[in-house]
Amino acid sequence: MKAKTTRGVFMDSQKLKEMGAAEVVWLATHLSGKKRRHIEEALELVPGQIDRWSSRKDHHTPSLEVLPELIEATTTGRDAGENVIIQWLLARVNDQNLKYDPKAMAIEEMERQLLHLGADFGSVAQCVIEAGADRKVSRAEAMRIKNAVANIMGRCQDVLTGVEPYI
């Protein structure tokens, strides 16, 4: 299966999931057509940080907090879904889903998951409140909200697949 990435480049999802984080950061910055220095300035990073993230020898990767901003900075069009970083993450997550063997969920686990869902909904509400404070939603804020909703959907899917008679 091929995934369309930034600037219309098609990547094989198998090749994407085999790439390391350093290769993906390098590819995303390269495909963006932007100078690394400009991306670092936009993200308020120290000079050379993207080179560190792109190096196989230097085992530094972007933090989860900076990932949405890195995706935004390396996305050239309006569709962040075409960004190679997102495609890489999806390829790796989809690979994990293929290995998933659903089993009946114990009632205690189901109760725990449902309690966590309540907290997750609170997190989404907090993201929306924070994003809406200025009555605008930036691309980074939209990504945070979408990710929070996706987490809820994943947890709901876990509960759905786990609802089986459990004796």
Image (cartoon, rainbow, N blue to C red):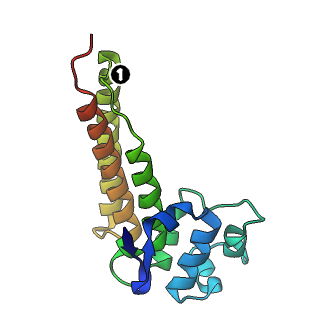
Is 74 in front, or is 90?
90
Question: In the image, residue 125 lies at what x, y percent?
Answer: 29, 48
Vertical placement of residue 115 versus 134, above or below? above
Query: Which residue has dot 1 on it?
Result: 109
Q: Residues within 10 Å of mark 1 (few under 14, many from 20)?
A: few
Q: Residue at x 61, y 76 (%)?
A: 26
Is 155 or 38 nearer to us in this picture?
Answer: 155
Q: Left or right: where does residue 148 sit relative to residue 31?
A: left
Residue visible at 54% across and 56% down in the picture: 64
Which amino acid type corresponds to the residue marked 1 in the rendered image?
Answer: Glu
Q: Residue at x 35, y 32 (%)?
A: 116
Quadrant location of the C terminus? top left
Residue visible at 65% across and 84% down in the picture = 37
Quadrant in the picture for the N terminus: bottom left
Element under label 1? helix
User: Residue 2: image x %, image y %?
Assistant: 38, 72
Where does residue 129 sit, x and y in percent of width and height?
A: 31, 54
Residue 66 location, quadrant: bottom right
Q: Is residue 42 visible?
A: no
Q: Left or right: 95 with respect to 22?
A: left
Q: Is residue 117 left or right of residue 73?
A: left
Could you tell me residue 157's position as x and y percent? Answer: 27, 40
108 over 79 or under it: above or below: above
